[in-house]
Amino acid sequence: MRAVHELGYVPNGAARNLVTRRTDTLAVVVCDPPQGVVSDDPLFSTVVRAISRELETAGKRLVLMLAESDQSRTRVEQYIAGGHVDGALLIALHGTDPLPAALVRQHLPVVSFNRTNAPDIPYVALDNAGGAATAVHHLLERGRRRIAAITGPLELYEARERLDGYRQAMRDTGRRSIVALGDFTRISGAEAMRQLLEDEPQLDAVFASNDLMAIGALRVLHQAGRRVPEDVAVVGFDDIEAASYTSPSLTSVRSPMADQATAAVHLLLGLIDGGPTDPVIMPNELVIREST
């Protein structure tokens, strides 16, 4: 050890990998197209930082890869097939994405950050349906009766699950669903809110499937002269930092994204070592503010 210290010896990682058959490197693959949901998501950096910290603690390296087109997806598959990583964590998967099945065929340990269309891939997901139902029941308890929903892009599992939670809560109380389509951006939330006011002028509450769309809806309600929450109550989802600074401040379902990222890393590391593949569902909570 004295000689190691004096000479500054560093073990040869490539030689060690030949023996252990491990690279100590994990890929984080973002499967979102350009201008997709990740590009405007303020929580994405929270997720990446949490993954990076957890891997650093475990003595692993992270390589961030984008699979945003057929060409880039092919490069990801080729890179992984070359044995450069021990496992992969997939983020922002869309329902028809072929990448998960391709990686499973390579016998690579893979974990999805949310559900996937590949049944063989374990995942860590939020309780999206339960969180949406909690938001709707909160609005009902506030005396709201005509509750609309602004949903995200339905090719994403989390958007479909939040819509399902909203619809189930409305069915449980015998009320009609009122749905407008958004894409998780502020602009789409504003456009959906304008359409809702035109189609359902008597609505008295809105559940938006994420906070960015809720913020867009708040702006349109203000422009239309609708008071929040007196005339229309608004609930978002995710509880991003900006939710505390809107006017009025936004009630939102808090998503523990950092905890979800940490749990995904733990699941992937366990999978690499032959551990269980049971999915993990993260709880969430409703943060009540001035908008309701």
Image: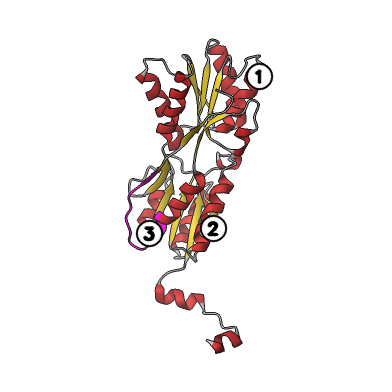
> Is any part of residue 156 visible from this angle?
no
Q: Mark 3 points at which residue?
A: 270
Q: Is mark 3 on a helix, strand or loop?
A: helix
Confirm whether the magenta stretch covers residue 107.
no
Amino acid type, callout 2:
Arg
Residue 105 has which mark?
Answer: none
Q: Is mark 2 on a helix, strand or loop?
A: helix
Q: Does the CB distance between marks 1 and 3 fall below 8 Å?
A: no
For image coordinates 52% across by 44% down, the residue present is 32
For image coordinates 33% across by 52% down, the residue present is 277
Q: Position of residue 153 (x, y in %)?
A: 49, 32
Amino acid type, callout 1:
His
Between marks 3 and 2, how big is the CA–CA gap? 17 Å
Residue extent of the magenta highlight = 267-281
Confirm whether the magenta stretch covers residue 271.
yes
- Is 177 situated left or right of 40 in this image? left
Between marks 1 and 2, how big is the CA–CA gap? 41 Å
Q: Quadrant of residue 162?
A: top left
Q: Is mark 1 on a helix, strand or loop?
A: helix
Q: Name the residue under label 1.
A: 222
Q: Name the residue under label 2.
A: 53
Amino acid type, callout 3:
Gly
